[in-house]
Image: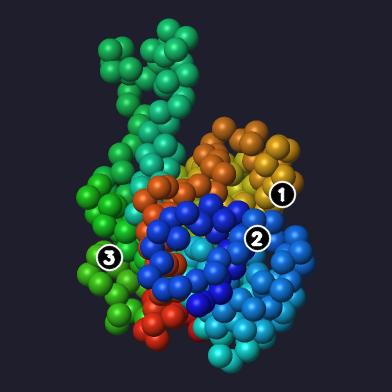
Amino acid sequence: MIRIVLLGKMAAWCEPELRRRMRCPYRMTVIADPSRASESAAEIERAEVIVGWPLTQDIADRARSLRLLQASGAGIDGLALDRLRPNVRVANTFHHEVAIAEYVLMAMLWLLRRPHEYDTRLRQGVWTGSCIWGETPVLEELYGKTVLLIGLGHIAREVAQRATAFGLHITGVTRRPNSVEGLYSKIVRWDGWQAELPHADFIVPTCPLTPETTGLIGADQFAAMKPEACLINITRGRVVDEQALFDAVKSRRIAGAAIDVWYQYPSDPTQPVLPSKLPFHELPNMFLSPHNSGWTRRTIMGRIDDIAENINRLAEGGELLNVVR
């Protein structure tokens, strides 16, 4: 029998679906609130699999029987992999790429076509911008614009496929240009991506958060962008410097931004928390979303499939999916 601990609300929510997918004998313990993990110390100590996040070093140290740490999503930033015991394998799971790619295209259209402004005015009977007056058109199209994708992983590939259908030019930035599929109009090495900023209409970081990518886009990078450019951040908030982003959008140094990943998060769902210490919510050229660009039913069901399959394979001695370490 394999012992499993589900850690955190996200993993706890998956419990019924995971149970339906198990092929091996198991014992499953749910710890929905990681701050109360000490109350289940015996189960953690005997756990062979921990599913979920966040995993503290204290929990990792106490899980002396741990064989697999299975993240319930793609991100494992914040975990010191080198501090885990050598026999512990770490795996993650994805399935959010399609949902996030759809969000990116939606954000592009929102920033470029400004449907919210026309909707608000027409609800008041105002037809400004309509073709019926013969006014000079001010709206742009996605067709022919350039998107700069910084990092060419799962998400970038799905964005590129959809951007191609809209007729955008796609510049991809990667450390391994020889391994890239033929989805991109132009491939740029990692050390040359900043030279592409003056030519990009949309800048989309799709790289993970690492010490090197923390603050990757700051005041100098915003200064290099053209005034018509827009930033769309769906990776991690700290990839983009918080103050520099606010200043660039407020001053119209760039045309606008769509942000799904933030700088401060709530700990209590009943208490409203603004996503930054800075008043991004006051800026009309900002599209704000609460870190839900990839949070769809399809995403979660795919992740549950992966998690259950990895536990079954571990019990059966098979090869695991999406092994990070």
Mark 3 / mark 2, whichever is N-terminal: 2
| Tag 2 and tag 1, C-beta contact below 8 Å | no
Closer to us: mark 3 or mark 1?
A: 1
User: Helix, strand, or loop for circle 1?
Assistant: loop
Residue ID at (28%, 18%): 131
Closer to us: mark 2 or mark 1?
A: 2
- Give 83 or 18, whichever is nearer the viewer: 18
In this rendering, would 225 be left or right of 176? right
Give the label on residue 184, or none.
3
| Amino acid, disc 3 | Tyr
| Amino acid, disc 2 | Ile
In this rendering, would 159 be left or right of 256? left
Residue ID at (38%, 42%): 106
| Tag 3 and tag 1, C-beta contact below 8 Å | no
Identify residue for label 2: 31
| Amino acid, disc 1 | Ser
| Tag 3 and tag 2, C-beta contact below 8 Å | no
Does residue 173 lie above or below 224 as drawn?
below
Give the label on residue 267, or none.
1
- Check the image and name the residue furthest to the top: 125
Mark 2 / mark 1, whichever is N-terminal: 2
Q: Give the percent coordinates (x, y) of residue 207.
A: 48, 67
Real-space Cα separation, disc 2 to disc 1, in angstroms: 16 Å
Residue ID at (77%, 67%): 38
Real-space Cα separation, disc 3 to disc 1, in angstroms: 40 Å
Does residue 52 lie above or below 318 as drawn?
above
Real-space Cα separation, disc 3 to disc 2, in angstroms: 44 Å
Total residue callouts: 3
